[in-house]
Amino acid sequence: MTISVAILGATGYTGGELVRLLSRHEAVRIAYVSSERYAGKPLRHAFPHLTSAPDLICQPLGELTEMEKVEVAFCALPHVASMKEVPKLLAHSIRVIDLSADFRLHDAHTYQEWYGAAHLAPELLPEAVYGLPELHRNTIPTARLVANPGCYPTSVLLALAPLLQGRWIDPNRIVIDSKSGVSGAGRAANQDALFTEVAAGFRAYKVVGHRHTPEMEQELSALAGSDVTVRFVPHLLPQSRGILSTCHLQPYAVRSQSEWYETMQSFYQREPFVRVLEPGQWPATSQVQGSNFCHIGITVDPRTGWLTVLSVIDNLVKGAAGQAVQNMNLLFGLAETSGLEQLPLFP
Amino acid sequence: MTISVAILGATGYTGGELVRLLSRHEAVRIAYVSSERYAGKPLRHAFPHLTSAPDLICQPLGELTEMEKVEVAFCALPHVASMKEVPKLLAHSIRVIDLSADFRLHDAHTYQEWYGAAHLAPELLPEAVYGLPELHRNTIPTARLVANPGCYPTSVLLALAPLLQGRWIDPNRIVIDSKSGVSGAGRAANQDALFTEVAAGFRAYKVVGHRHTPEMEQELSALAGSDVTVRFVPHLLPQSRGILSTCHLQPYAVRSQSEWYETMQSFYQREPFVRVLEPGQWPATSQVQGSNFCHIGITVDPRTGWLTVLSVIDNLVKGAAGQAVQNMNLLFGLAETSGLEQLPLFP
Amino acid sequence: MTISVAILGATGYTGGELVRLLSRHEAVRIAYVSSERYAGKPLRHAFPHLTSAPDLICQPLGELTEMEKVEVAFCALPHVASMKEVPKLLAHSIRVIDLSADFRLHDAHTYQEWYGAAHLAPELLPEAVYGLPELHRNTIPTARLVANPGCYPTSVLLALAPLLQGRWIDPNRIVIDSKSGVSGAGRAANQDALFTEVAAGFRAYKVVGHRHTPEMEQELSALAGSDVTVRFVPHLLPQSRGILSTCHLQPYAVRSQSEWYETMQSFYQREPFVRVLEPGQWPATSQVQGSNFCHIGITVDPRTGWLTVLSVIDNLVKGAAGQAVQNMNLLFGLAETSGLEQLPLFP
Amino acid sequence: MTISVAILGATGYTGGELVRLLSRHEAVRIAYVSSERYAGKPLRHAFPHLTSAPDLICQPLGELTEMEKVEVAFCALPHVASMKEVPKLLAHSIRVIDLSADFRLHDAHTYQEWYGAAHLAPELLPEAVYGLPELHRNTIPTARLVANPGCYPTSVLLALAPLLQGRWIDPNRIVIDSKSGVSGAGRAANQDALFTEVAAGFRAYKVVGHRHTPEMEQELSALAGSDVTVRFVPHLLPQSRGILSTCHLQPYAVRSQSEWYETMQSFYQREPFVRVLEPGQWPATSQVQGSNFCHIGITVDPRTGWLTVLSVIDNLVKGAAGQAVQNMNLLFGLAETSGLEQLPLFP
């Protein structure tokens, strides 16, 4: 089987990762890559590290007719831009894995409230499936439209799912202190992401109101069976890749370190991409670099009663392109790990 | 006036900072620097960046007799090593600013519990003054022995003092998520601090039980007038200098953003080294690099009710050597800012 | 004495360094700072690290009348923009230290050839003094217009001056392999200077034809007393500050390591800002960070006959703002080191 | 076919890379990994990023009997240690790919001169094949012992081979200015490789006498058909991976930019891992990160006559583990790219 795929927005960092992964996926042929800035030029002009990938010429977005034979499109456009394209793709019977935020929230009003724009395709929201395979593996395979999760929500949902589903923690005292590498800011020229600004300038940003918050709360509430409100503060790390989320939690019960570990471990023991670290070990962003893995550590502080869960992912892989490929594998009945077997790169 | 000073442990990063600052302090003469590893050699062999500082030859620790004319000693030795030397110095009528943890805790049992060693000079604990000038400016000037605060506690105490003293927050629901540059790990060869391990490997460490915890709690309890317990999780940043502490707090009252700002601003308005940033601005470690400043931001999340205070310092300056010089200025009746006027270095 | 100064282009990295240094210069009052982007706003909005500098409000460039009482202007504008302003400043009897390239080359045709623009004030070129104090200390004090050297040329001229003046090396076989920190690229948003592009992406740039080449050759030729041609290849380092120039040279004579060292050392022994490292020691960019120092090492490879000189400077200080202050000190008869006594920051 | 392999010295950075690559090589089974420090422990304790690799328990070196069924051993031990083990391996009929320097030089006296130790197995030197496939593809397949090239020599030989073999450049005026990431210094605790020392401290090291020099000269001389002497100066970059070598050359003839490009391009056009960049494009270390590729750029400076070749590799892959796998593929008649198809990781 060879699946013919399109990548819309191929010259951002997420687009580059999709090309990197899909070029080496044995069941995939990349039929189409779009880029306004590099239209008509080889993709390797945008990404010299892809010089040895198959030759691809960037197309401007308008030329959708060329995509008729494509079976699935990865939409790596900014939000709003994405919901303009997705209905056209679906109308051509092309399944869509959308990496923007446009179809992650079930509720169009919540979308408008947090993103400051009216939703342009609210009729598609009911059928969009939130593409976190560890939580929605059963509904993804038959979806026409998969909303690929945000990078921060991926790290947080994997950290908290076992605890909320098991009713182990207070759902209204969750503090999430996340730290992300700079690639999350994208490839567009941007003073705040200059080397000189970032390298010695660790800082928090969007201390109140980061747009990934409602996405986390929607999925956490579904897990908890009740409304969950989280306090979420993101920070910008001086490294290119990686998210570490430190989740400060108040448990309902006093349990031992090994009991907490077992709760996490049993939840994820059959997952191909989630690893719960043994007690005494802690995740580091370097443990998952370039890979689709998520590493999780859990510990309880007997002195204060607080429970801490730490999780790491590569924001461009499990937090974006890799998870999208994982979703594609589910859509087409492939092994979920196809094209994602690479081990992390360290150092 | 020229104060004759000694620096014990001059070839670690804190020692190097003491030399950098004191070499340019107009009221100071560095009379003695100790180092076992570089004994007999010029200090610039250890620190080529100090090639243009006054010529100093490192001495081994034993030769204390040479220090007879010294008025104050900065003790930048590791803990335990420090409490072996401090009594000798005091016996020579040398005032001591100790940068180790050995005299910060008032209670010898707490010291033993957290540091795993019996205290060797418990008789000195009652007279040791905790050298955070913003809190103890009145008692420092007459001290024989100043316990210079830890780097994390400095960042946390300055962030929380106005709120605890004013009884604005719940003292038993304080979550502190701190991030420190690598210089905090010292200059000794250490696999965990290699460039290759750290540069893409952001991680938490000592997730439970970091030794700076009791120091924070001691001072916070004094401010609150009741026992304070904090949940403290430190992380290791891929940058050389800087600490950012993100304090997640539960306020007792619903107040506006500007009310919270005013509480902080009025507390620190006459402080030479603490700056409360205007609402909408946030601290970054790059804002204080190489300087003795602390920048603080405060915000309330009206949606969740959580209050967040962020503070940044340079861990080697306000978190160590700079604060020690500030304490020396107080000990000798100098302007508190003497030798500390340098503006931060950016980028 | 208080010198009233203006800084044109205060919100670039070089402008920020001028403010940092001049704010703490005891003979200087900053009377005027210009910025188009931050016009009407406090400078600390552009540079939060300068929150504790004197309050300064940015002015748009046009309002030159306010500058009437200014004695010297530091012009930190881009090239071409600079030569539009400098004649106006001189017409107001304001002495000028120009940090752009516009007045460094004596020959207007060479300027046009390398910078691709006709010179707008060629009549000023004969009187402009090339402001490298180590070479032109005698002519700077009486200048109306000082052309502050480029960062790469500063590092290269200090490395080669003793050897070319002494006729020790072949002037037409000079290979200069330089590496610069990212701050040299400025603060404007620029994809090539993003953290993500630079952090793991060491590379050469402008492999042929970098514009600092004719400036080096002009000054080297003057030193050699004959035309000098250099092969110059710059590289972009993943660090914020610092230039290291590796100069590969062919000596005319076979001499010992200590003879070469003596040649360098005797040339610079009275210089306040140049240090020749003892044989066996080598410069690192960290040795001069934040300071006006230049560290130089020299070695001969007896096996191949090649001579290697390595020099490091902080590109924003000795390579720009610090050297400009040094020139100002000369213009006003101050000690050459005034305001530049800070020791380097390490780590 | 499944090849059973051993990795000696599996817990250094090169060993970790061998495990990363060989774990995903479809024709390989890792039968044995050695480590003194982690003897008896799972390899993932040394390398948490390999948590999802096959479970492997580290063995101490002595237990060679367990290796009887191994077909090929990758020896990633330090020099000297390596030449103690290699004869034993060969005596067990195990083919060896040695990643140390011990078998790269054909001449035992040259080895002793540069490495300061007598060679312990000089009888093996005549049969050891220098494992740079691009130059020795014909002799590698039948070798018992492959000496895997050094990282710097790999980058330099690939840059210069077409020019020396074609007699295009003066073989005695070659200047090589190389820059390497920190992983080249290994994983042992080492003050010089601390984050704090390296991050802002770009520097040259071993300015005279780096041990990779004779290896380059041996192979370059063979290519040139005459003795070649190079001036080689290495530098330490603040990034984890990557080597960029800037080769400054004097050509014998005046040729156009496109002629020089054609010379390089035609030499490498059928190579799977070498890419000559089109004129106007330049290599960056980020273009090859994590991959076995080498990117090369060439340009001539018409003004000075100097020719510049720039090459980049990942020092741990094409400069070590990846090239070793490439050699293994040749030894066993596999496709040369087996297990090395991964595209580079960027950013």
Image (cartoon, coloured by chain):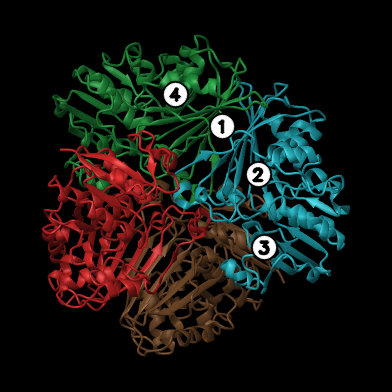
Chain colours: A green, B cyan, C brown, D red
Q: Residues within 10 Å of mark 4 (few under 14, many from 20)?
A: many
Identity of the residue drawn at 43% across and 18% down: A267
Q: Position of residue D236 (x, y in %)?
A: 42, 61
Nearest to the eye among marks 2 and 4: give it.
Answer: 4
Q: Position of residue D295 (x, y in %)?
A: 24, 55
Does dot 2 land on a helix, a strand or a loop?
A: strand
Q: Is residue A327 above or below residue D297?
A: above
Marked residue chain, label 4? A
Q: Which residue is mark 1?
A: A207
The residue under label 3 is which amino acid type? Answer: Ala
The residue under label 2 is which amino acid type? Answer: His
Marked residue chain, label 1? A
The residue under label 1 is which amino acid type? Answer: Val
Label 2 and label 3: CA atoms lie apart by 28 Å
Label 4 and label 1: CA atoms lie apart by 22 Å
**Is label 4 in contact with label 1 (beta carbons under 8 Å)?**
no
Residue D311 is drawn in which quadrant?
bottom left
- Left or right of A58, for residue D234: right
Circles 3 and 1 on the same subunit: no
Identity of the residue drawn at 57% across and 24% down: A257
Marked residue chain, label 2? B
